[in-house]
Amino acid sequence: MISDPARTPPAETPSGIPTPILTPREVRALERVGDILAPAYGPLPAFSATGCVRNVDDLLRYMPPEDVADIRLLLRILSIKPTSGIRFILALARAGHRWRGPLGATLRMIEIGLKGLVMSLYYSGKAAPGDAAPGNSGRATVDVVGVIGYRPRVIPGSGLNPPSRTPP
């Protein structure tokens, strides 16, 4: 049975980041999955190096409790697998579109759930350079959005403004 996050004191994660929803074991599994889905590449840091996992509760709070329970169960299962086992499960989930019925649907949901959680955290833009999370032992987080140079803006008169809606 999964404990009630409202009654559970925040757990100290391997990264030193407290989370009231996930256990340290589940956070460790999420970081391992994240490092597989978002490894270090050129100037981009690996998922675990960003410190973005500190924002996981921000996402999980908006998920239905049943989905949070499913994600937690999946993370606990993945926590006992070696990295090669996690890679195999992720590859199987990525190929879920090849199967019909309950197996294919389950594999697609695993891919959507894990990849959505990891990528939402990784590209959230919530981690900023030098912004150490409370309890994070001073470890700086990295702003991935800043590293890739993504700075959206609307320039007045560029044609991106919505047309005015004046009656004829």
Image (cartoon, rainbow, N blue to C red):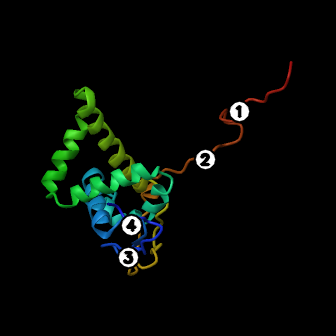
Image coordinates of residue 136 in percent, x first then y, are 40, 77
Residue 51 circle label: 4
Of residues 131 and 157, the one drawn nearer to the viewer in this rendering: 131
| Residue 163 visible within the image | yes
Q: Label 2 vs label 1: CA separation? A: 14 Å
Q: Nearer the viewer, residue 160 or 75?
A: 75
Badge 2 marks a residue whose secondary structure is: loop
Nearer the N terminus, badge 1 or badge 3?
3
Question: 124 and 81: which one is in front?
Answer: 81
Choose mark 2 or mark 3, whichever is in front. 3
Q: Quadrant of residue 3?
A: bottom left
Q: CA distance from mark 3 to mark 4?
A: 8 Å
Look at mark 2 in the image and give the residue it sits on: 153
Name the residue at 32% across, 60% down.
Answer: 1
Instruction: Tell me the residue that label 1 is attached to.
Output: 162
Labels 3 and 4: the sequence-earlier one: 4
Q: Which mark is residue 139?
A: 3
Q: Earlier in the sequence, mark 1 or mark 4?
A: 4
